[in-house]
């Protein structure tokens, strides 16, 4: 089975928009585990019942926070929904978050320079950096 057919990813560059097209259902990616991965956008996501531990971002909170519209529409076009996913020791790059202020976790500032892996393009999904 290919790397994309699996639900657990370790130490990879994960191009979120390509992954949701390959292993998601519509705009929803569910029950995936990411350990020590670089989660790469550009993308806007909504976390629903996700476990996020020891993760970081290169962008300040005001740059990644997207407020939920009120009243909430039935559907938000372009939004990637992450449901029941786990993220451990990951870095998020160019990822906006809907409902960021209400999240039960913190994304710490990432140390060091922004990685250059985003220059390789989405064909690197699932491959070692």
Image (cartoon, rainbow, N blue to C red):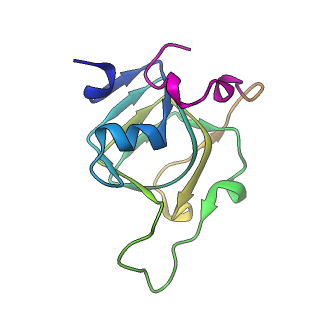
Q: Where is the N terminus found, in terms of image quarters?
A: top left
93 magenta-colored? no
Q: Residue at x 47, y 16 (%)?
A: 127
Q: Is 6 left or right of 120, judged from the image as shown?
A: left
120 magenta-colored? yes
Measured from the top left, where is residue 30 in percent x and y? 28, 45
Number of marks in the rendered image: 0
Q: Where is the C terminus found, in terms of image quarters?
A: top right
Measured from the top left, where is residue 99 in percent x and y? 51, 65
Tell which residue pokes out farthest to the right in this image: 113
Residue 72: name its quadrant. bottom left
Measured from the top left, where is residue 32 in percent x and y? 30, 36
The residue lying toward the viewer, choosing from 46 and 43, is 43
Tell which residue pokes out farthest to the top in this image: 128
Tell which residue pokes out farthest to the bottom in this image: 71
Residue 100: name its quadrant. bottom right
- Where does the magenta region start and end? 115-129
Can residue 74 be seen here? The reply is: yes
Q: Residue at x 51, y 30 (%)?
A: 90
């Amino acid at each position: 089975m290919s790397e994309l057919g699996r639900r657990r990813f370790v130490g990879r560059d994960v191009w979120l928009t390509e992954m949701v097209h390959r292993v998601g259902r519509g705009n929803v990616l569910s029950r995936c585990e990411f350990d020590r991965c670089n989660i790469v956008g550009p993308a806007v996501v909504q976390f629903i019942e996700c476990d996020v531990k020891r993760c970081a971002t290169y962008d300040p909170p005001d740059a990644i926070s997207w407020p939920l519209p009120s009243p909430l529409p039935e559907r938000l076009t372009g939004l990637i929904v992450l449901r029941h996913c786990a993220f451990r020791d990951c870095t998020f790059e160019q990822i906006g978050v809907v409902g960021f202020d209400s999240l039960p976790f913190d994304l710490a500032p990432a140390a060091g320079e922004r990685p250059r892996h985003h220059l390789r393009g989405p064909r690197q999904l699932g491959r070692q950096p």
